[in-house]
């Protein structure tokens, strides 16, 4: 890594060399991700956002349908516009590709890393797979974070109004984007006060934008009182829970998956105590690395502590959530390239900080290389095997005209992936009604026994005088129920999206 260079003349040899690196790297990244996107079978979390946007009649309806999901609406607003043009889910994937590629463009053009480190990063697990191939709202957060870093670290006076606008949008990307924006907003206010920034009206306007973004995001992410998602808080002191929570640092920095077919959200080191130990080492390295630079130190410490506090007390999350810890580390390195140094205090801290600085590039490159291995491994498996069996199940149902039957789907979130590919509504026993996206309120019953599922399917068949197709993601005990097994789809990389089809006769 090196300090951010001063912008070169567009016609200079240095500018030409940067262009010769930037364009092939960006196009190569976009082409690879496009290939993976076209091969990737979307799963329930991707479909939930798409189905909510598709089946919302207007913007107020969209916000109403989001009341249980705990996400700000920025991604869904983009999807809402796409669904006014097409119902093909490829539209969502292309929009996601655009967001991921834009984030990579900002990183390649402005980040203060070597070319090798930039290539390792963009082909790493999060930029190349988790936040690119899997179409979720987090890519918008990556774009917002990198845009802030690029603009904040640019030489010359700060454009506070534009920085405030970026943080406003970052707040609307996801709850984790909101947490990061809170810390960046604190940095922005602190820098404005420290420097006695000119143009006070613009600084005030930026502060208002950030505050409005925080309030608007909180209004959306706080779910309805009858929500069934992440209910309650956990403030009890539990050593095992604490260490498991701390282990997320290791899993985000070094997300090498276990050598297993069902690789997703696994780690090569499976024991949480070992993961926690390595997490402490990584955190100590980061603290010492930024010890002499107050701004990146503030971002790293407060941002990491905030995410870990949330995962401990409210929502443990998965690899896609934990990845924001890694992004904070990258953003802190970025800010460190444009931040002044102070003395760290006691001499032993200076010695440790000097040691970390001396080995910074090597350590960062090793982390980026591990990310690359994880990204290539995940992408290869997704390319060769079905991420979800939902597309295969939907295609089978269409080929055999089973999609014309009444379809009863359970569990509902897994069945919703098939509903997305069929572009139709299913009957969900969990709510005793028809739907596409999942309404995650307390009336929803996901732990129904097989007897209840079959009983509801038979009742629907008798009422409608029509055969019913029972779509499950768990197998029924053979010979126990009056149903006809039709087919099974059991090669999904995500085990919860394996499927079993059963026919329920109207006269059975």
Image (spheres, grey):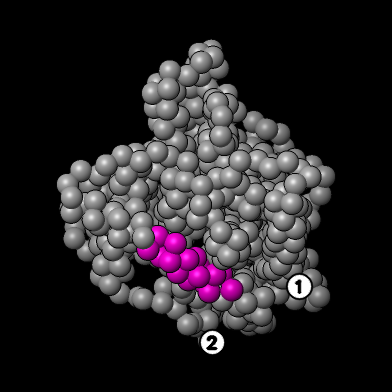
In the displayed structure image, the side of residue 178 where residue 273 appears, left or right: left
Question: Mark 1 or 2 closer to N-term?
Answer: 1
| Residue at the disc numbered 1 | 395
The residue shown at (60%, 61%) is 115
Q: Nearer the observer, disc 1 or disc 2?
A: 1
Q: Quadrant of residue 361?
A: bottom left
| Residue at the disc numbered 2 | 479
Q: Quadrant of residue 232?
A: top left
- Asked if residue 375 shows in the view, the reply is yes
Residue 466 image point, x, y percent: 73, 66
- Please tell me whether residue 333 is drawn above or below residue 266 in the rendered image: above
Q: Is residue 14 magenta?
A: no
Instruction: Say the numbered circle drawn on residue 116.
Output: none
- Please tell me whether residue 199 is drawn above or below residue 105 in the rendered image: above
C-alpha separation, residue under disc 1 versus residue under disc 2: 27 Å
Residue 288 image point, x, y percent: 29, 53
Q: Secondary structure at mark 1?
A: helix
- Please tell me whether residue 460 is drawn above or below residue 188 in the rendered image: below
Q: Which residues are magenta?
A: 359-376
């Amino acid at each position: 890594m090196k300090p951010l260079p001063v912008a070169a003349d567009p016609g200079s040899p240095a500018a030409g060399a940067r262009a010769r690196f930037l364009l092939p790297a960006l196009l190569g990244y976009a082409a690879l991700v496009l290939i993976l996107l076209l091969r990737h079978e979307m799963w329930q979390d991707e479909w939930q956002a798409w189905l909510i946007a598709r089946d919302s009649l207007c913007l107020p309806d969209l916000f109403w349908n989001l009341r249980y999901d705990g996400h700000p609406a920025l991604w869904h607003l983009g999807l809402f516009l796409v669904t006014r043009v097409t119902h093909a889910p490829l539209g969502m994937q292309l929009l996601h590709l655009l967001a991921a590629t834009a984030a990579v463009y900002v990183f390649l053009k402005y980040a203060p890393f070597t070319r090798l480190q930039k290539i390792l990063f963009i082909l790493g697990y999060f930029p190349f797979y988790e936040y690119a191939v899997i179409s979720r709202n987090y890519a918008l957060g990556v774009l917002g974070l990198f845009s802030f870093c690029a603009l904040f670290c640019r030489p010359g006076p700060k454009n506070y109004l534009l920085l405030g606008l970026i943080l406003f949008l970052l707040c609307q990307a996801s709850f984790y984007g909101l947490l990061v924006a809170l810390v960046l907003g604190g940095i922005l206010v602190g820098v404005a006060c420290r420097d006695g920034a000119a143009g006070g009206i613009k600084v005030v306007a930026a502060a208002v934008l950030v505050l409005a973004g925080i309030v608007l995001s909180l209004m959306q992410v706080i779910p309805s009182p009858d929500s069934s998602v992440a209910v309650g808080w956990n403030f009890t002191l539990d050593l095992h829970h604490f260490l498991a929570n701390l282990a997320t640092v290791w899993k985000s920095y070094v997300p090498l998956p276990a050598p297993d077919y069902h690789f997703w959200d696994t780690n090569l080191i499976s024991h949480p105590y070992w993961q926690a130990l390595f997490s402490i080492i990584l955190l100590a390295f980061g603290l010492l690395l930024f010890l002499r630079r107050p701004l990146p130190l503030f971002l790293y410490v407060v941002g990491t502590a905030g995410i870990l506090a949330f995962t401990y007390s409210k929502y443990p999350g998965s690899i896609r959530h934990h990845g924001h810890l890694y992004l904070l580390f990258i953003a802190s390195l970025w800010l460190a390239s444009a931040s002044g140094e102070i003395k760290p205090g006691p001499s032993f801290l200076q010695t440790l900080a000097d040691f970390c600085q001396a080995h910074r590039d090597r350590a960062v490159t090793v982390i980026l290389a591990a990310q690359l291995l994880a990204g290539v491994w995940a992408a290869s498996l997704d390319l060769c095997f079905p991420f979800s069996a939902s597309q295969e199940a939907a295609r089978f149902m269409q080929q055999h005209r089973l999609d014309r039957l009444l379809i009863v789907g359970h569990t509902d979130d897994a069945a919703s992936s098939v509903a997305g590919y069929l572009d139709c509504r299913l009957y969900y026993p969990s709510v005793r009604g028809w739907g596409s996206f999942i309404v995650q309120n307390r009336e929803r019953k996901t732990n129904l026994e097989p007897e209840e599922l079959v009983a509801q399917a038979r009742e629907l068949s008798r009422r409608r005088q029509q055969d019913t197709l029972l779509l499950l993601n768990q197998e029924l005990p053979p010979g126990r129920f009056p149903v006809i097994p039709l087919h099974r789809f059991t090669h999904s990389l995500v085990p919860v999206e394996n499927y079993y089809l059963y026919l329920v006769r109207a006269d059975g």
